[in-house]
Image: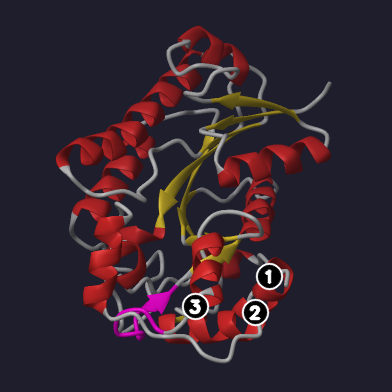
């Protein structure tokens, strides 16, 4: 029998990558999406049918946070995560043969702005503000389900780096146009994960049935924003980059309709549980990751 995996919210950068990789591994991949041509979120029976006999469900659904945080967008960001997670939980409960593993996306933004020490699953301090409220509600919706036959794992994912998509495109553009200096104070920590390690971690968790709960999905070697931009300039053979003070970032964010939190919040996250469980990172350092990502 062909193995089956369901990816909810599977049409973005990460979802498309995972779809291709799992198909290469021999899986039948079913996608749930608001886009035409896929299983619709309105099709509750279609979702349940897709989940029957599936090996794994991966939920990545949620409106992008790359927008202005006004009331309408805030509602969409929150509902697009909690409501879809609820739909999936109810569908699993309705299955006769539910998936053995449900991996739900979360975010490393759940932790506070941290410049003093790294945040682990056991000793990390939950922050405050809208983005943290979203993360907490998302995880609460996920863990509110008691599923006797389905193991549940929440991935607190750091900023994802990969070739040809995600944040690498705007970062590389900044360097190309001479703006690749430190952003804001420059000492805010940058926690990141290579997209290949997203797949590696999912496969690792699939094969470790004793593991469940919350996992930080980030490189074991975060670095400051200043170090990030320096290594990115080096990888692109650019000696100099103008810094961007916070006031300039605020103006730019308003012009392109996003928020400076994405750049200025200090995310200092360590994957303690994954390291303790024995996961070996394919790209533990940014230098190794950039060597694979940046094509000159």
Secondary structure under the numbered disc 3 in the rendered image: loop
Task: Choose the circle earlier in sequence order: 1 or 2.
Answer: 2
Residue at image position (28%, 81%) is 245
Q: Residue furthest bottom?
A: 239
Q: Is residue 227 left or right of residue 96?
A: left
Q: Label for residue 222? A: 3
Instruction: Look at the picture and state if 65 lies above or below 296.
Output: above
Secondary structure under the numbered disc 1 in the rendered image: loop
Task: Choose the circle earlier in sequence order: 3 or 1.
Answer: 3
Q: Is residue 146 left or right of residue 175?
A: left
User: Dot 2 corresponds to which residue?
Assistant: 236
- Please say if the residues under marks 1 and 2 sit with CB atoms less than 8 Å apart: yes
Q: Quadrant of the C terminus?
A: bottom right
Q: Is residue 20 visible?
A: yes
User: Dot 1 corresponds to which residue?
Assistant: 294
- Please say if the residues under marks 3 and 1 sit with CB atoms less than 8 Å apart: no
Q: Is residue 123 visible?
A: no
């Amino acid at each position: 029998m062909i193995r089956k995996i369901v990816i909810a919210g599977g049409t973005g950068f990460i979802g498309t990558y995972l779809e291709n990789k799992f198909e290469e591994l021999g899986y039948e991949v079913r996608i749930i999406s608001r886009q035409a041509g896929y299983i619709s979120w309105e099709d509750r029976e279609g979702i349940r049918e897709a989940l029957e006999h599936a090996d794994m469900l991966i939920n990545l659904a949620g409106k992008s946070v790359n927008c202005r945080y006004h009331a309408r967008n805030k509602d969409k960001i929150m509902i697009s995560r909690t409501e879809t997670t609820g739909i999936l939980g109810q569908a699993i409960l309705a299955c006769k043969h539910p998936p053995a593993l449900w991996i739900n996306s979360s975010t490393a933004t759940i932790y506070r702005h941290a410049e003093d020490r790294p945040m682990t699953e056991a000793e990390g301090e939950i922050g405050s503000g809208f983005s943290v409220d979203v993360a907490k509600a998302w995880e609460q919706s996920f863990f509110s389900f008691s599923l006797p036959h389905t193991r549940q794992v929440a991935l607190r994912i750091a900023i994802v780096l990969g070739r040809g998509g995600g944040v690498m495109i705007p970062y590389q553009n900044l360097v190309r146009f001479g703006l690749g200096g430190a952003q804001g104070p420059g000492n805010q920590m940058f926690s990141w994960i290579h997209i290949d390690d997203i797949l590696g971690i999912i496969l690792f968790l699939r094969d470790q049935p004793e593991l469940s709960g919350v996992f930080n999905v980030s490189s074991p070697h975060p670095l400051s924003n200043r170090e990030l931009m320096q290594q990115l300039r080096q990888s692109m053979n650019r000696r100099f980059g103008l810094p961007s003070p916070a006031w300039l970032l605020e103006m730019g964010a308003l012009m392109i309709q996003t928020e400076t939190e994405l750049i200025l919040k200090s995310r200092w996250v360590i994957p303690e549980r994954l390291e303790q469980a024995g996961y070996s990172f394919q790209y533990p350092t940014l230098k190794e990751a950039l060597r694979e990502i940046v094509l000159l």
